[in-house]
Image: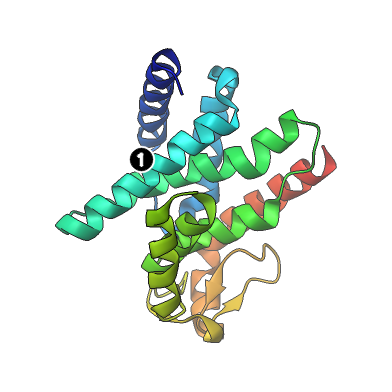
Amino acid sequence: TDASNLTDFQQGFKEYVDIYFSYGTMDMSSVPKHTTPAVEEFVQEHGHLITEPFCNFVYAQCLEMYLIGSLTGKDVREDLRAAFTLATNLRYRYIPEKNGEAPDIDKISKYSRDIHTERGVAKTLAKEISCPCADDLLKISRKMKKVGKCFGCREEMDKDVLMECSKCRFARYCGRDCQVQDWNEHKAVCKVIRKKTRMVKND
């Protein structure tokens, strides 16, 4: 990446972060509602950045944030989610669409859940970044317990005990009670996910 591209990447990423946080901070229940307009607004204004080099730059920002958080104890979760969301949507939706290929909605959905656990972040970064330090992350992530978060009680627990919403296949719950109690909050998000999934698959 030459100096002019790097400057363009840095400015573009800064503008994306501003757009992202203009929608407020994000919690698990608001992921699809929150990130879809933020990413779409950015892509509409910066179509020239729908490229693999820029995507790699954003993933590099994710890795830097993760390492800073791990080494200093600084809470970088929201900044990391912002960057991660952009990189994932670029690589698995917008770049494929630009090339006339089908987006990988399942991958986007999986990564959107994974960014809420440390193991998920470490493992995903290791898969997406070609770097010796990323290889170390993969080794570390494999030693971590497989956990996920219930969208109802927000408790972290063994991934195998969580069940998914049969409608959107995005939200995960530790049991029927949590799913029922969360429905009033989740139903709007559930509808958005299903609508977006149909739109993307029909494009």
Identity of the residue furthest to the left in this view: 72
Q: How many marks?
A: 1
Residue in the picture at 55% in, 49% down: 32
Residue 20, given in percent of the width and then of the height, sits at 41, 35
Residue in the picture at 38% in, 71% down: 140
Tell me, yes or no, if residue 29 can be seen here: no
Choose top left, top right, bottom left or bottom right for residue 28: bottom left
Q: Is residue 31 left or right of residue 6?
A: right
Residue 50, given in percent of the width and then of the height, sits at 60, 27
Residue 103, given in percent of the width and then of the height, sits at 73, 44
Residue 133, given in percent of the width and then of the height, sits at 37, 55
The residue to which callout 1 is attached is 24
Q: Is residue 121 left or right of residue 45?
A: left
Residue in the picture at 45% in, 18% down: 5
Tell me, yes or no, if residue 87 can be seen here: yes
Crowding at mark 1 (Cα within 10 Å: few <14, some 14-19, many 20+): few
Is 190 rendered above or below residue 9? below
- Residue 8 or residue 33, whichever sits in front: 8
Choose top left, top right, bottom left or bottom right for residue 170: bottom right
Which quarter shows the C terminus? top right
- Residue 79 or residue 180, whichever sits in front: 79
Residue type at numbered disc 1? Gly
Identity of the residue furthest to the front in this view: 132
- Residue 119 or residue 143, whichever sits in front: 143
